[in-house]
Amino acid sequence: MTVSADLDDSITHPVNRQDGVALWRQIAGTLQADIAAGTHKPGSQLPTEAELSVRFGVNRHTVRRALEELSRDGLVRVEQGRGSFVAEDVLDYTVGARTRFSEWIQKHNKDPSGIVRQLREIAADQRIAAGLGVRGGSRVVVLERLGFADDRPVSLTRHYFPAARLKGILPALQASPRITDALQTCGVEDYVRKETRVTARLPTQTEAELLRMARNRPVLITENVNVDRAGMIVEWSTGCYPTPRVQIVFEP
């Protein structure tokens, strides 16, 4: 195994097996001190388990236990298949009368982007129908999108629109996935947030993979209702946000 110069230096100071402190706790403490000192910057990838095993002179199971502890403390996030990263600062997602994804991300000096996972017309089940104030089975358009701040996923959202009330909403979203632009094409010049409900739970396997987070860390779940100037519902949406990266703040 080839070891970098930095690891060569640190391998001369392996963990102390005689002081009664568990090896994984010593490793976690050392990595925590490294992060606090700025050796590993927020968002940066930590050395691999194999490299840390060499550095501390222990097996990979011991290293993994230390990383799990740091993950539970919120200092490290583990991305399945990619490795361990130093946790970034948590982004405040401010919920107000006009809550827009791009503005939220740009407020934190990051670049917003997104991947459309699905865009199609479906029949509304009872939950969607209740959210939109339409009859069950009514035709609605669903837009599912994975949102990013720079290259980090921060949201997984599903947006539902009443097809009969918003004529042409599907082709409008196909032309521009920006919801504000699509609604303007359908004659909705402005819309505001009427209601937001927030709960928390553990992520599903798919959510954890898409949001690049551990399954033992919770996600925030939102249900949102947006209305036009006349008070008619133009959108009902659900959102899934990783708590290691996002917290929700309500404006007074």
Image: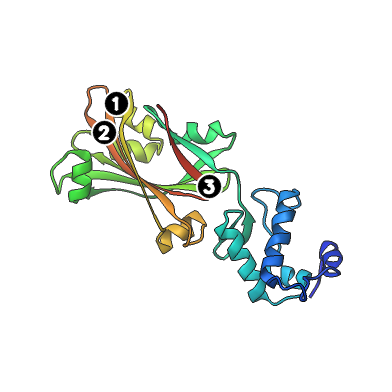
Viewer-side residue, 189 vs 53: 53
Which numbered mark, 3 or 2, is in the foreground of this view? 3
Tag shown at residue 245 = 3
Q: Who's the residue at 61% across and 51% down the image?
A: 87
Disc 3 and disc 1 in contact, CB within 8 angstroms: no
Q: Is residue 163 visible?
A: no
Tag shown at residue 234 = 2
Q: CA distance from mark 2 to mark 1?
A: 8 Å
Which numbered mark, 3 or 1, is in the foreground of this view? 3
Horizontal and vertical percent position of residue 208: 46, 59
Horizontal and vertical percent position of residue 126: 17, 50
Q: Quadrant of the N terminus?
A: bottom right
- At label 2, the amino acid type is Val
Horizontal and vertical percent position of residue 61: 63, 75
Q: Is residue 142 visible?
A: yes
Disc 2 and disc 1 in contact, CB within 8 angstroms: yes
Which numbered mark, 2 or 1, is in the foreground of this view? 2
Tag 1 residue? 188
Horizontal and vertical percent position of residue 80: 54, 64
Q: Is residue 230 above or below residue 100?
A: above
Q: Earlier in the sequence, mark 3 or mark 2?
A: 2
SS state under label 3: loop
Q: Who's the residue at 16% across and 40% down the image?
A: 134
Q: Earlier in the sequence, mark 3 or mark 1?
A: 1
Tag shown at residue 105 = none
SS state under label 2: strand
